[in-house]
Amino acid sequence: MAFLPPPADDRLGPGAGLGLAPARAKGPGKRPAPPVFPPSAARPAFFLIPALLRLSCLFLLILGGCGWLPKINVVSDPLSKEEHLDLALAYERDGELDIAEREYRASLPLPLASLGLGNVLYQKGDAGAAMTRWRRAWRDGGLPAAANNVAWALLLDGGALEEARELAARAVETSAGLGEDEAVVSNYRGTLSQIDAAIEAARRARQ
């Protein structure tokens, strides 16, 4: 004798006769409640974020391969180093030392820029950095003003007077050979004279 399923009952909800609890209607004329799915069936929207990120990266890679990505153009300095040097000199004359320092740095490695930068740094109280710049201006450009400035700073420091005298003498010699203004050469001679006096005073003190 064949097994027949129980007859369907319209009053019972889905799953009647299949071993599932029937979803009974609440009140006449109302439909049965829908079945409840497990929580994993309704995944939140934020689970889609990693997939969207991967798609975005893939899209950017495709654009980059096709040359469609925007390119950043680096704008070069419109001013030449000589123009920066002119600005630095003007700002130094006006007492704008911070701006002058910036413009001198923009005009490096011009020897005159090293000289001017040393002057500004010395005025701002950084004698060590100023000496470094003056020595570089003398070494790279043979500027007598740089040699004179180093000699003067050494004189004020009270040490290395022999080196100071040598630099002062070279400043006088080089300045005269370049045909610089007599007032400038006379200024360098004044530095040399004061160094000679300091050396003589130190010699007498040792006796």
Image (tube, rainbow, N blue to C red):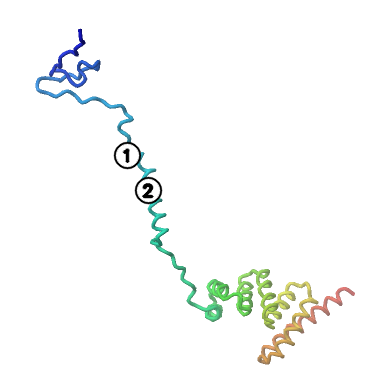
Task: Give the number of the mark in front: 1 or 2.
Answer: 2
Q: Identity of the amino acid at label 1?
A: Ala
How busy is the neighbourhood of tag 1: few (under 14 within 10 Å), some, or many (20 plus)?
A: few
Q: Residues within 10 Å of mark 2 (few under 14, many from 20)?
A: few
Taking the image as shown, residue 109 lies to the left or right of residue 27, namely: right
For mark 2, give the secondary structure: helix
Mark identifier at residue 194 = none
Q: Quadrant of the N terminus?
A: top left
> Relative to 100, is 75 on the left or the right?
left
SS at badge 1 = helix
Q: Residue furthest left?
A: 29
Where is residue 155 shown, x and y percent of the image?
74, 76
The residue lying at 17 percent from left, 18 percent from top is 24
Q: Which residue is mark 1?
A: 45
Residue farthest toward the front in the current orientation of the protein = 1
66 in relation to 145, above or below: above
Residue 55 numbered mark, or none: 2
- CA gap, disc 1 to disc 2? 16 Å
Q: Quadrant of residue 45?
A: top left
* Closer to us: 170 or 125: 170
- Report the residue at 39% width, 55% height from top: 62
> In the rendered structure, are the residues bearing label 1 and label 2 in contact, judged by CB atoms less than 8 Å apart?
no
